[in-house]
Amino acid sequence: MLKEAADFIRRHQEFILISHISPDGDTLGSSLALSIALKNAGKKAEIVCGDPVPDLYLFLPGASSVRKPSEAEASDAVITVDCAALSRAGDGQMLFESAKETLCIDHHRTNAGFADVNFVRRASSAGELIVKLLNELGYPMNREIGICLYAAISTDTGNFAYSGTTPDTFRAMAEIVETGFDLPEANRILFRTVPLRKVRLTSLVLERMQLSRNNAVAVSYADQKDFAACGARGEDSEGIIDAMRDIDTVAAAAFLRECEDGSIRVSLRGKSHVDVSGIASAFDGGGHRLAAGCTLYMEMPEAVRVMTEALQAAYDGTET
Ligand SMILES: [Mn+2]
């Protein structure tokens, strides 16, 4: 797999790299790192993405030159980066299908291998696989590649905290740190910078949080008026549910967010013995035991009541 991927790179001169839709740090950082390495090796590479690059990642070298798939010229060699399925390529699928030869670089367990050549392996991140690929090719890393790969691996591992973080992850990081990129600065940008509007929204939601069952059940919400009052967007509510879950007394939490179409997106979190996946599936949602979600079509006060009762029932079930 790794050798075939390296041969794929060797036998082509021009590449299109596809970052997945709703791009994250891993798909962007990995694509940018690979494209810089290819250019340093005298090849041509262009990155496309079906969605715009989030502001947070625009500090990465080359991020502002990521283009829409419709703006790119077709290429013989197309590489998907961090795409668990071809559908994740979005509009980039057109470029993938018109390519002479395709390569898939991915670390998701569910990836069945949809390209001609598949470098698909369990790893913390696609970034970790890019390090292996560059080593196999004998392509050197520089600071620019280093900062991109750091962004890829650190964001996909929750800053080296998730279970997918392995000794191999740190071996890859050792090589990345050796490039001499500014780690504290990259860390500050990626993990220690919060837009003021997001702080305002978070404090509003935490302030109105309703606690019950001896502070074990937490429920709160933000409606469209709240978003407007804070100047916040939907993405700014990311992480609020985790702030609720992290409270020491809380065993089950729900955060309800009114979307622009009036529907209510519910994020659910449980802790150790409280399973919230059943609540999500009862409302046509899904997820895991400790992290799940669903969408409700009702007024906010009713939605808050319904979710509070469901969480209390799930919590009571663990008490007896
Ligand atoms: Mn990834």
Image (cartoon, rainbow, N blue to C red):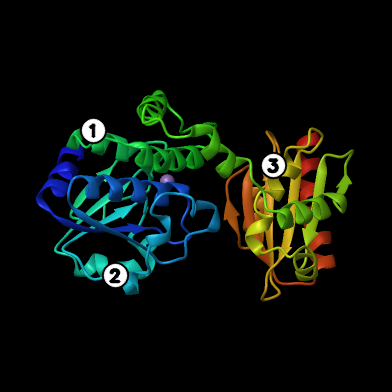
Q: Nearer the viewer, residue 77 or 148?
A: 148
Can you give x and y, in whole percent of width and height, for residue 3 in the image? 16, 38
Q: Is mark 2 within 8 Å of ligand 1?
A: no
Mark 3 to mark 1 CA distance (whole Å): 41 Å
Identify the amino acid type marked 2: Ala
- Residue at (23%, 45%) from the top-left corner? 40
First of labels 3, 1 by sequence position: 1
Numbered label attached to residue 72: 2
Looking at the picture, tell me which residue is in the foreground, 317 or 263.
263
Location of residue 83 by image quarter: bottom left
Q: Which residue is mark 3?
A: 270
Badge 2 crowding class, 10 Å Cα cut-off, few under 14, some 14 to 19, many 20 or more, is some
Residue occupying the point 69% across, 35% down = 273
* Element type at mark 2: loop
Residue name at image x 27 percent, y 51 percent? 104
Circle 1 SS class: helix
Q: Which mark is residue 135?
A: 1
Q: Amino acid at mark 1?
A: Asn
Q: Nearer the viewer, residue 106 or 138?
A: 138
Q: Looking at the picture, does residue 217 appear above or below residue 249? A: below
Placement of the C terminus among the 4 image quadrants? top right
User: Which quadrant is the N terminus positioned in?
Assistant: top left
- Can residue 121 be seen from the camera position used here? no
Task: Characterize the local packing of mark 3: few (<14), some (14-19) or many (20 or more) Cα atoms within 10 angstroms.
Answer: many
